[in-house]
Image (cartoon, rainbow, N blue to C red):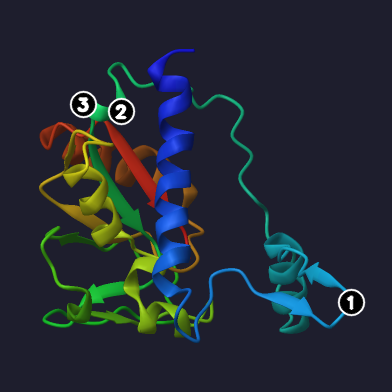
Amino acid sequence: MTAGRIGLPFLWYALLSRITLSVAGDAAVAYRHLTDERTVRMQEPVSYVRALAEHYGAMGFPPYEWTVNESAPLETLKKPLSAARVALLTSGGISRTCELPWNPDARNDFRLDEIPPETPSEGFQVHDSYYDHSDAETDINTVFPLERLGELAAEGVIGSVAPRHWSGFMGRIYKRRQLLETEAPAFAKLLAEDRVDALVAVPA
């Protein structure tokens, strides 16, 4: 197999395994189980599409028209993961405490914050009404694993951490043409300026 085909899935696994271990000793556990003396049954994963449709349908909103993209190019890494520069993008309403918080009910907000990778974990705040971020308030790495990514770079699993990470595209975005034709290309240009090889997008 090529490095590109196995690299990014491995990076996701490495990040998720570290996130799970980092919170296992706290009350916030990444994977919760329902147990009794005789059985162990994992909770069913959340069906976000159905949950969102039911939530907003109860508020009187029409069914949301999800974007179906059948033409996006699938790219593989052109270099080994151990030589790749990696950046993070979170859409979870995360900002540094020295900056303005996000509007927790944001719609069509194309704000994009630069996040220095050396920002300490206690230097963040979370404002997003679209998900339960209690775990993120305990450990920001559960939704924005910048410390875990730094560890992977120190161990040589990835080549390097990008000079800046990102927080943006938060909330509900209805202006798809602006997103596809203006905002996304502008963001891609910023990643190219930083010579990023791989972007780990972490939705809320």
Q: Find the residue positioned furthest to the right.
A: 38
Q: What crowding class fits label 1: few (fewer than 14 Cα within 10 Å), some (14-19), or many (20 or more)? A: few
At label 3, the amino acid type is: Ala
Q: Secondary structure at mark 1?
A: loop
Label 3 to label 2: alpha-carbon separation = 5 Å
Please count the marks in the image: 3
Residue at x 40% of width, y 40% of height: 11
Q: Earlier in the sequence, mark 3 or mark 1?
A: 1
Compared to residue 37, the image places residue 166 above or below, namely above
Compared to residue 189, the image places residue 71 above or below, namely above
Depth order, front residue of 61/146: 146
| The image quarter in which residue 69 lies | top right
Which circle marks residue 38 in the picture? 1
Label 3 to label 1: alpha-carbon separation = 47 Å
Locate residue 66 relative to residue 58 in the image: left or right: left
Residue at x 24% of width, y 74% of height: 95
Q: What crowding class fits label 3: few (fewer than 14 Cα within 10 Å), some (14-19), or many (20 or more)? A: some
Which circle marks residue 150 in the picture? none
| The image quarter in which residue 111 lies | bottom left
At label 1, the amino acid type is: Arg
Residue at x 68% of width, y 64% of height: 48
Q: Earlier in the sequence, mark 2 or mark 1?
A: 1
Q: Secondary structure at mark 3?
A: helix
Disc 3 target residue: 83
Q: What crowding class fits label 2: few (fewer than 14 Cα within 10 Å), some (14-19), or many (20 or more)? A: many
Spot occupied by residue 110 in the image (x, y as percentages of width and height):
32, 60
Q: Are marks 2 and 1 in contact (CB under 8 Å)?
A: no
Residue at x 17% of width, y 79% of height: 123
Disc 2 target residue: 81
Compared to residue 196, the image places residue 155 above or below, namely below
Q: Are marks 3 and 2 in contact (CB under 8 Å)?
A: yes
At label 2, the amino acid type is: Leu
